[in-house]
Structure formats: C-alpha cells, structure tokens
Image: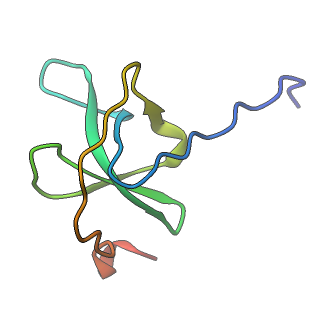
Amino acid sequence: MSSCPRMPVYTPKVGEIVRDLAHRTADGEPAEGVHMETLAGLAYLRPVGGGCEWTTKPEHVQRLDHPHDVTVQHPGRPRAHDVA
C-alpha cells in the first residue's frame, strides 16, 4: 500500500473548458472540451465548437492554465444509454 496521499479530483463547473488527459487530438495533444456534467462516475465533455459528447473518468479531467468558460444555455442530461 502506498503512503503517498492521493491528489483530489478536480471538479469543474458546467461550461468550463477543461483538458482530458485520457483522449488525444490528431497532433497528440490532450483533448479539450466543455464540461457538461459528471454523472454515474463519468465526466461528460463536448467539443468547444459543438459536436458529440464523450465521457472520461473524472480523474483524467484537468483545469486549464488559463481557464475560460462558454455559456451552456440548456445543459441536458447525458444520453441515457451511456449511463449504467
């Protein structure tokens, strides 16, 4: 068992643009997306310019060095078939 304390998981607010360390762009950089919600142990992110959401584990979500938000007018529930 490790004696190192665990780092707390970052909890972004809805509409905050975050970095997803588990997903990469075509150039190999960590993906950035708009945080939509955390539900059933998964963080739901959507591309900044719009598009299909994806899921990642909350521990893979990282705050940007210079955070910024987008307005989420009608945050919806994640697709029902994605929630266990």
Residue 45 pos. (x, y %)? 30, 51
Residue 69 pos. (x, y %)? 30, 41
In the image, 28: left or right of 49? right
In the image, 5: left or right of 65? right
Residue at left offset 39%, top offset 55%: 14
Residue at left offset 48%, top offset 46%: 12
Number of numbered discs visible in the structure rendering: 0
In the image, 28: left or right of 2? left
Figure quadrant of residue 54:
bottom left
Residue 44 pos. (x, y %)? 36, 57
Q: Nearer the viewer, residue 78 or 26?
A: 78
Task: Give the vertical position of 65 relative to 12 (above or below).
Answer: above
Task: Give the vertical position of 73 relative to 55 (above or below).
Answer: below
Q: Nearer the viewer, residue 4 or 50?
A: 50
Q: Quadrant of the N terminus?
A: top right
Residue at left offset 84%, top offset 23%: 4
Task: Give the vertical position of 74 relative to 4 (above or below).
Answer: below
How did the renderer colour the structure? rainbow
Q: Of all residues shown, which one is farthest toward the bottom?
A: 80
Residue 13 pos. (x, y %)? 45, 50
Task: Give the vertical position of 72 relative to 84 (above or below).
Answer: above
